[in-house]
Image (spheres, rainbow, N blue to C red):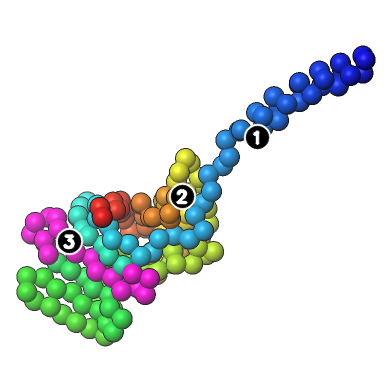
């Protein structure tokens, strides 16, 4: 009888411990891949310059970045197509077979970082906080960091420190 009481007491002590351990907060799970096909607005700062743009990119690397602010540059578009590159502004357009923007330009840096993010295995997890994971990696525009939403891999922020470039992305509403 005494043994039975000791066994019951032990069980009563172990059950709450198991419950607490099983209910403890689990670390956030990083996404299996980052969303490199995007349709988003972007707030861009590079040094002292600030721009507002729209960014669209598909999984094949076809992309368009269109400036909306400052108003003087409203409508300027940079294009990456399967068959070449282009830039247009105020009804004027230039097309080329080779990229003509330097890798240090904000537009090239954004596209280069997205291209580098296609291979998540080449990225290093720097931190995980709440529902966000910060990755670092290297692209044609230099070392970068991106902050992604753990739920779907949407890149919310990218930075290229050597270019003094920061881009905050906001999803387009469907």
Give SS at disc 1. Answer: helix
Please name the residue that numbered disc 3 is placed on. Answer: 67
The residues tagged by marks 2 and 3 sit, at their Cα atoms, a distance apart of: 28 Å
- 7 lies above or below 151: above
Q: Of tags 1 and 2, which is closer to the observer? A: 1
Please say whether residue 62 is one of the residues in the magenta stretch. Answer: yes
Q: Position of residue 155 (x, y in %)?
A: 38, 55
Please say whether residue 78 is one of the residues in the magenta stretch. Answer: no
State the residue in front, 19 or 80: 19
Q: Position of residue 69 (x, y in %)?
A: 14, 55
Q: Earlier in the sequence, mark 1 or mark 3?
A: 1
Q: Of tags 1 and 3, which is closer to the observer? A: 1
Residue segment shown in magenta? 58-75
Please name the residue that numbered disc 1 is placed on. Answer: 22
Give SS at disc 3. Answer: strand
The residues tagged by marks 1 and 2 sit, at their Cα atoms, a distance apart of: 22 Å
Decide if residue 125 is on the left or right side of residue 17.
left
The residue under the point 8% across, 76% down is: 92
- State the quadrant of the N terminus: top right
């Amino acid at each position: 009888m005494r043994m039975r009481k000791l066994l019951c007491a032990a069980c009563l002590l172990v059950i709450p411990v198991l419950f607490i351990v099983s209910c403890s907060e689990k670390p956030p799970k990083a996404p299996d891949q980052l969303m490199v096909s995007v349709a988003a607005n972007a707030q861009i700062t590079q040094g002292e310059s600030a721009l507002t743009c729209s960014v669209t990119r598909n999984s094949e690397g076809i992309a368009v970045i269109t400036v909306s602010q400052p108003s003087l540059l409203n409508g300027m578009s940079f294009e990456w197509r399967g068959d070449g590159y282009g830039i247009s502004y105020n009804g004027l357009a230039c097309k080329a077979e080779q990229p003509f923007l330097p890798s240090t330009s904000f537009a090239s840096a954004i596209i280069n970082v997205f291209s580098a993010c296609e291979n998540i295995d080449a990225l290093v997890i720097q931190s995980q906080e709440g529902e966000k994971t910060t990755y670092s990696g290297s692209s044609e525009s230099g070392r970068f960091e991106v902050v992604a939403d753990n739920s779907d891999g949407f890149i919310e922020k990218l930075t290229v420190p050597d270019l003094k470039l920061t881009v905050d992305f906001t999803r387009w509403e469907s």
